[in-house]
Image (cartoon, coloured by chain):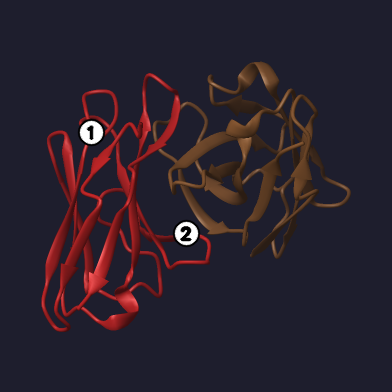
Chain colours: A brown, B red
Amino acid sequence: VQLEESGPGLVKPSQSLSLTCTVSGASISSGSYYWSWVRQHPGGGLEWIGHLFSSGRTSYNPSLESRLTISADTSKNQFSLRLNSVTAADTAVYYCARDHHDFGEPYSWFDPWGQGTLVTVSS
Amino acid sequence: QPVLTQSPSASGDPGQGLTISCSGGSSNIATNKVNWYQQVPGTAPKLLIYSDYQRPSGVPDRFSGSKSGTSASLAISGLQSEDEAVYYCAAWDESLNGPVFGGGTRLTVL
């Protein structure tokens, strides 16, 4: 299974950040896994952004929920992230990952990860 | 501030063993499974340990995980130069209803 992130590397403040993760070697619509976005700020800290199940069910980090949409295009075996009204604090490397989580269960681990894509928010 | 607490750095000589610790609380480590990730600089994190002590296929048995109360540990035996990386712990958090991470421990093999 391989994942690859794509999208603009530079976004202006107050605009929207949109990224796509293309999955190969597995079907995101199979119903076996969740699919997550995780970001890593310049200082190194990792932050879970949110995840998506094949049914369209999503769950988001409450700190981002008001600005965030995660969606899927099963025809392309891709899932996407859209984060609105970005600020410099959203500058990070964004990773997509297969998420080993079951609905309602308190566990989640990420394997494998994409290689990551750096998004810088700056005018 | 990361929800889980890790020492920022650790070091050891080749061949030695060491332990990296991760401290949490009642809403995460105390009640839920802990995972560990290894991140070599310039690359994506890689799953090292899941569900407290399980190793994915391909991870050497030199790496082992354990948990007690609100703390978890990653033990590495027979240190090798390729073990130089940043190690992150993670666990499901009931308050967030999602996974949280530690700040990472940078391991240097002397």
Tell which residue pokes out farthest to the top in this image.
A66
Tell which residue pokes out farthest to the right in this image.
A75
| B69 to the left or right of B24 | left
Mark 1 or 2, nearer chain start = 1
Image location of residue A82, percent across then percent down: 75, 33
In terms of depth relative to the viewer, which is nearer, A75 or A30?
A75
Instruction: Please report, as a chain letter, where disc 2 is located.
Output: B
Instruction: Please report, as a chain letter, where disc 1 is located.
Output: B
| A9 to the left or right of B33 | right
In terms of depth relative to the viewer, which is nearer, A1 or A31?
A1
Q: Residue at x 70, y 65 (%)?
A: A25
Disc 2 element:
loop
Same chain shared by disc 1 and disc 2: yes
Residue B76: in sight, yes or no? no
Asked if residue A24 is positioned above or below residue B59 in the image, the reply reads: above
Q: Residue at x 45, y 66 (%)?
A: B41
Q: Residue at x 35, y 60 (%)?
A: B86
The image quadrant of residue A5 is bottom right
In terms of depth relative to the viewer, which is nearer, B69 or B17?
B17
Label 1 to label 2, Cα distance in Å? 21 Å
Q: Residues within 10 Å of mark 2 (few under 14, many from 20)?
A: many
| Residue matched to label 2 | B45
Report the amino acid beneath label 2: Pro
| Residue matched to label 1 | B24
Image location of residue A110, percent across then percent down: 49, 50
Asked if residue A112 is positioned above or below residue A54 in the image, the reply reads: below
Q: Residue at x 56, y 43 (%)?
A: A39
The image quadrant of residue A113 is bottom right
